[in-house]
Image (cartoon, rainbow, N blue to C red):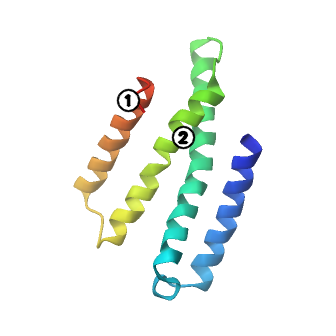
């Protein structure tokens, strides 16, 4: 699963770079915008899972405890955390991003992470 996520994230990065330099939102249409947001999520998912894995490893080293289920935890928290950049990008596309929208997205992410920690999501 790690290799698949790594390959998907690298591929998404290259397709995103190509899309940003060679197309415009009006030129690709609705399907192209959907592909763009999907690629952003896949890229952020790879980064979030990697970041969560680093966080849990460092947390285990600081607590001097054995690191149990780090991969499993990172795959639970990663998809939730990967939504934050997507929400910010979608909010920006509707005409600007204000501070209360950023605070609402942060509160939503905290709620989602809490729900994941309690095995609700």
Compare residues 93 and 57 and report the one nearer the observer: 93
- Say which element carries label 2: helix
To which quarter of the image does residue 39 belong? bottom right
Task: Report the front residue among 32 and 96.
Answer: 32
Which residue is rendered at x = 40% and y = 28% of the image? 120
Residue most extreme to the right? 3
Which residue in the protein does label 2 denote? 78
Quick check: can you spot residue 57? no
Looking at the rendered structure, which numbered label has been put on residue 114? 1
Q: Is 71 situated above or below 93?
A: above
Q: Is residue 28 left or right of residue 58?
A: left
Is 34 left, or right, of 112 in this rendering? Answer: right
Q: Quadrant of the N terminus?
A: top right
Residue at image point 55% right, 69% down: 35
Residue 29 at x, y percent in the picture: 48, 83
User: Which residue sits at x=62%, y=33%?
Assistant: 53
Quarter of the picture holding the C terminus: top left
Instruction: Please state the horizontal and vertical placement of residue 6, each as a whole percent of the image.
Output: 72, 49
Classed neighbour count for the residue bearing mark 2: other residues with Cα under 10 Å, few (<14), some (14–19), many (≥20): many
């Amino acid at each position: 699963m790690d290799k698949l996520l790594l390959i998907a994230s690298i591929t998404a990065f290259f397709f995103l770079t190509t899309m940003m330099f060679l197309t415009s939102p009006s030129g690709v249409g609705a399907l192209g915008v959907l592909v763009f947001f999907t690629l952003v999520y896949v890229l952020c998912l790879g980064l979030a899972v990697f970041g969560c894995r680093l966080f849990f490893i460092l947390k285990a080293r600081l607590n001097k405890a054995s690191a149990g289920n780090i991969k499993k935890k990172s795959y639970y928290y990663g998809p939730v955390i990967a939504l934050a950049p997507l929400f910010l990008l979608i909010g920006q596309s509707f005409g600007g991003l204000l501070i209360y929208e950023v605070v609402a997205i942060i509160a939503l992410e905290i709620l989602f992470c809490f729900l994941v920690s309690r095995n609700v999501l």
